[in-house]
Amino acid sequence: MRWFRNKDTLYGFLVLLPSLVLLGVFVYGFILQTFLTSLTDWGRDPTQALSANPQINLIGFENYRELFTGFVDARFRQDLVNTFFFTLFFILGCIGLGLGLAIALDRAPRGEGFFRTVFLFPMSLSFIVTGTIWRWMLQPEGGVNQLPTLVGLPKGTFAWLTSRDQVWRFSWNDLPFFTGLTVGLVLLLVAIAAFRAGERKRGLMASVSAGVLFLWAFTLGRALKPLPYDELHGFNLAFIGIILAAVWQMSGYTMALYLAGLRGIPEELREAARVDGATEWQLYRHVILPMLAPITLSAVIILGHISLKIFDLVFAMAGADNAPTDVPALLMYLTTFRANQIAKGAAIGMVLLVMVALVIVPYLYRQLKGEVRR
Amino acid sequence: MRNWLLSLVLLLGSLGMAQSGKLEIFSWWAGDEGPALQALIDLYKRRYPNVEVINATVTGGAGVNARAVLKTRMLGGDPPDSFQVHAGQELIGTWVVADRMEDLTPLFRQEGWLDKFPKGLIELISYKGKIYSVPVNIHRSNVMWYIPAKLREWGVQPPKTWAEFLTVCRTLKGKGLEAPLALGENWTQQHLWESVALGVLGAADYANLWTGKLRFTDPKAVAVWNTFGQVLDCANKDAAGLSWQQAVDRMLEGKAAFNIMGDWAAGYMTTTKGLKPGQDFGWAPAPSTAGVFMMLSDSFGLPKGVKNRTNTINWLRLLGSKEGQDTFNPLKGSIAARTDSDPSKYNAYLQSAMRDWRTNRIVGSLVHGAVAPESFMSQFGTVMEIYLSSRNAQAAANAAQAIANQVRLGQ
Amino acid sequence: MIGRALQYTFLLLATLFFLLPVYLVVVTAFKEPSAISLSTTWQLPDRWYWESFAQAWNAFLPKLQNSFFLTVTATLLSAVLGSLNGYVLAKWRFPGANIVFPLMLFGMFIPYQAVLIPLFQFVRDIGLGGSLWGLILVHVVYGLPITTLIFRNYYAEIPDELVEAARIDGAGFFGIYRRIVLPLSLPGFVVVIIWQFTQIWNEFLFAVTLVSSPANQPITVALAQLAGGEAVKWNLPMAGALLAALPTLLVYIFLGRYFIRGLLAGSVKG
């Protein structure tokens, strides 16, 4: 549609304007304000923390420094580690189960509608409802732990939500090293892919960057120690229960995505592969799964941003005080509204925003770039 | 400033003007503690039948959930007419210093309460010479509960010191009792810590922690964590999943020998469980704390800018009255904050608590808001976390001191 | 044949995984409080006990009413605004639209913790602190990106020729919307309304921070407080969970097709 400087386009703009202003204020304005708040000492002085007209001072990036290298904020750092592992296993679980269900349903079983309804219904529930239900399921002396007794086995003893066991422990001081290593490896893979695709220039760029990162990781990265002592973090086993509940709720979503994708693959393509003598396994491995790759990307992004933000599920399942299952979103709430450390709460909010933006912005860019050319 | 206005309102109120409208009371007294509050509300309704009382409770022991909700309401400009707050720093260091509460000194004067409440308690609810809340009750934090019959069965005595406690613990473990100490969720662990701290440090040094005279990093204070760790090894591993009542239940079921909990546990055992104090269950001061009464007190204040001010003042007047306190406390399982209450209305445990309250040395509780402001108290959970995950006493002590510096504890 | 057997085994196991919690909820909700014990969790109740539902209903009725009022108002407002926005973006592209649209979309992905503190102050300062209207405003605004997105993608399917023809007939901006776009919008509205309804009904963070007075509480907050309390008898939270889940569950069961469309629209491309 062409646009002219005519009345109708003006109307269009005017109709859109209120929404733009509202979102401008509520999203960007408030983010800016949160950022500014995070640079202050609001909450450090108890006489000002809850005052009607608080006197607050700028203190630069002190709150961030404390969060990442301060003595007291070990809990925040463990929360970041928790989020990382939670996100990882939550996405793997949803993709694995969702894909499995989608393939099983795509092969036209009897009662397909019933199965689909069953697998998707948790999606319509609130995280609070899911959390309440699973809290009961995972009581240490009951629920899931009692299941084995139904078939005559001894009951389970795992303390689902309160276990303090930690595996894969590492020192916070090793984080720069590991980060450099991981990013370097990813770049190396990019480089290999680029060379294979014949894009020499890109491949060269990527491999050089990877090399620099490796060099940095093994020299400066090793020497860079955020803390003067070793602080161990790891995967809290108490999260297994949360992951279980989250996968229960969200794997229907990936199933729906994959099912839509599978239904979009023309039958002729499958027939052609079968005629070529491909087994069912080969058909999926070489024809269908590659075609589902963009869907996987979408699913990873959407699930990833949900899991980075996860708040209500943990709140309802384990309560706000259960440190083994703490996440940054919950800590932000507690820091702000219980400990009155408002500026630090703002800083945690900003860290969350940056994590989500790192995932979402490139995705939005990719998704919309194609459309704009249209 | 507004004192003359308050006096005027008090005067009008005492003239017995028919009051109507609403009164919203915010507390965390739900469940087992609900009947005591309800009795007070009923009493209020008899006096002011036209006032609609809204009982806003947020469940969660020791007010862990309620405090966050209260904050959003106060900050959001929607204060409840009166809210439950622990006497001491939880009131002063959080709300009074932020200028959110009205001065209640005129009410105390007019009602003649100044010599009806213990002087130390009035100091706890005062800031710069003004009084800011009406205390309803006194609870004791450092109590160890047990079942006499069970202890006889196991052949052990209630330990008098923490060293004895650890010995008894080993004995009981030897007899197959997996976890001699019953422990519950997060805040009950901190509750245990304060009893250990009091026992290890003694009353004077314990009090010095909160005035800044004794640093958390002092070797004496670090030692608290070591003892605490040994005591924790006597406790159940699934503690974090249990409410305080469920922890008490563990002891009642004989799965544990001891439970260290405030004396609301006595209320729970007598009222909800129908047990007889002294026979069905016994008590002793937490080890090494005999002769010291670690107190906490629930109180109600008057936030600035409430909707139903007169009704609220009438509510406060009822709370501070002898009748109000003697209605509430026997049900709640606490003793009256007033010194002139009627002992015959209280059960065996509470009568013993009254005696101790009068004769013991008094110190304030950390977890229950008496000695440290909320900003310290709620971050103390982090300290506990550092200890529980690392079992490193020095690290926990350092973290505690860092937080104390950050919130300017004792300054 | 082995493939088939495997397929059905997998489906049945998955069904078990998805339905076990439901079984447990129902069974627990129908037990007498005294009959609930951890070791008999999985057994059917000896006697079906309806009282918990009556209790939960009494306790939750005002909260359910709050939730309904909040959800319906916010859903309708955000749907109407989304429809207008989508119409503009799909049919009246103006310069800068390609920049404005992604900036709008970003708003639906942000962690709300990053805006919570100023938002809280803003809602208080405009005098809506603690009221349901404040919450409605917030849900309408943060619902705009998704409703706009769904409508924009939906209206993109309406052939430009139709719009062009109407213009030649002399219809203006609003005329085209009323005569061409709106009559075709019903399925779009259904998708958006269902989506927003479930989202707002289920939302918790805003509800717990912006509306804390019990009189205005939505159901999710009430349920979280009931279940998070101490020494809970589990029959009540379970009955409450069923009540809280019922509206969105019914929507899903009867309008599942549209629900899934909304779900898929959430991944940006329709």
Image (cartoon, coloured by chain):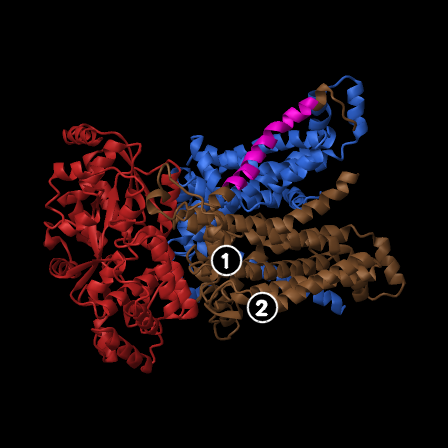
The magenta stretch is: A10-33
What hue does chain A carry in this figure?
brown
**Residue in front for this viewpoint, C110 or C1:** C110
Label 1: chain letter: A
Q: Earlier in the sequence, mark 2 or mark 1?
A: 1
Q: Which residue is mark 1?
A: A68
A316 left or right, relative to A118:
left
Image coords of residue B53 (percent x, y): 28, 37
**Residue in the picture at 27% in, 50% down:** B89
Identify residue type, mark 2.
Answer: Arg
Helix, strand or loop at label 1? It is helix
**Residue in the picture at 45% in, 68% down:** A164
Image coords of residue A55 (percent x, y): 38, 40
Name the quadrant of the N terminus of chain C: bottom right
Query: Which chain: blue?
Result: C
Helix, strand or loop at label 2? It is helix
Image coords of residue C56 (percent x, y): 41, 47
The reply to whether the magenta stretch includes residue A319 is no
C238 left or right, relative to A222:
left
Q: Which residue is mark 2?
A: A222
Query: Which chain: red?
Result: B
Closer to the observer: label 2 or label 1?
2
